[in-house]
Amino acid sequence: MEINTNSKTSIKSVDLSFNLSKEISKIDKVKTIFACFECGKCTSSCPVIDLFPLNPHNITKLAALGATKYVMKEEILNVCLTCNACNVSCPQDVDFIEFIKFGRILLHKLGIELQETHDGILKIITDIQANRDKPPQLPADLIPEGYQVSEKGEVAYFVGCLPILDTVFQDIEANSSEIARDTIKILNKILKKPPVILKNAKCCGHDALWKGDIETFKKLAEHNVNEINRLGIKTVITSCAEGYRTLKKDYPKYVENVNFEVKHISELVAEKIKNNELKFSESLDKKVTYHDPCRLGRHMNVYDPPREIISNMKENGIIFTEMDRSFENSLCCGVSCFINCNDFSKALQLDRLTEAKGVADLLVTTCPKCQIHYKCMQHEKKETPSSEINLEVTDLVNLIVKMMGL
């Protein structure tokens, strides 16, 4: 296949005569594409199907048959949220989103970029991190006053891009750095010694991977794995659903010497509660519901720990109620790796906020980006306030810290 290196290339101007069916034979689960018996479950589960004619089983089948010009359309590979709803619903275990990722990798090699949101600033930041030796400097105030971190130890906290998100989304008061600060507070209380902070870590590379930029992803991943191994870390804690999936599932697939365990902060806190090592001291009279992020839920099957934590707060005044669409049927927040922030995604955000407001006055999630997208929708509607989406949105670690009285 001839690769065009012009990053502004249009799909219409590139040579698509290569053998797509031969290319996709490189996908691990390609054989399952032919196992599809067109039951339609993937299509009916797709959150954008009512907004865009995205048909997962048709796309993968046509690809396997070599229909390159149809499958490699930018709008098809761009609109998919990679939420994994299709994979979860498929009785034949067809890996649709792996195919989408592979298609994006091909597009990237052809020099075609997906639609970037926020003027591409987040991509620029990621590219800079990947191509310079010096990692980004963490904010001086990231360590809360009165709390400590260790220079050496076996448990480390991966901060990731939270401080960067704070800078980019300060107009909607995302407060992403507060998630990091509160995670450090929690770890100080539940670990035997303060955690190591991975000061020299870079972006985990999640967005680069799902945009098809494998080269950038590998640079970031290799740097982070080398840094974690250099410090002798045995367990890495994340407070980000995307970072959790990337470090735990994608790093071992693309990078060598991943010799550490990865845990989401909710898993660790839930363990401490079960062992009677953590109790909540504060009261809060709130009706709370929980939004399953795609990366933590459908991608990694982590559904119970966040719910166990919130349910444990019932004696402190919290009333926990599920939305109709929860667990594997949870509705995606509408944006993946900061592409395709459009009318489709906004419709999904409005739908989800309305559903949450119907059962609660506090929406809790475990994905900083989900929180940003919901707050962004609320910010957009602030000129015409709507009671249907007027509820508080927060991260689980922020709620934990509040209930611990920290």
Image: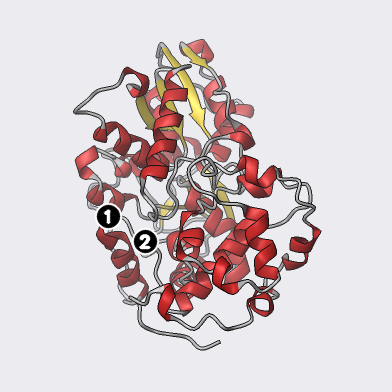
Q: Which residue is mark 1?
A: 118
Q: Indicate whether 262 appears above or below 265.
A: below
Separation of disc 1 and disc 2 at Cα? 10 Å
Q: Judge left or right: residue 324 versus residue 143.
A: right
Q: Residue at x 55, y 64 (%)?
A: 101
Q: Residue at x 33, y 75 (%)?
A: 8
The local secondary structure at tag 1 comes to helix
Q: Indicate whether 357 appears above or below 173.
A: above
Q: Is residue 184 visible?
A: no
Dot 2: few (<14), some (14–19), or many (≥20) neighbours within 10 Å? some
Q: Indicate whether 350 appears above or below 259.
A: above
Residue type at mark 1: give it: His
Q: Position of residue 12 (x, y in %)?
A: 42, 75
Q: Judge left or right: residue 373 versus residue 223.
A: left
**Residues at badges 1 and 2 in contact (C-beta under 8 Å)?**
no
Residue type at mark 2: give it: Gln
Dot 1: few (<14), some (14–19), or many (≥20) neighbours within 10 Å? few
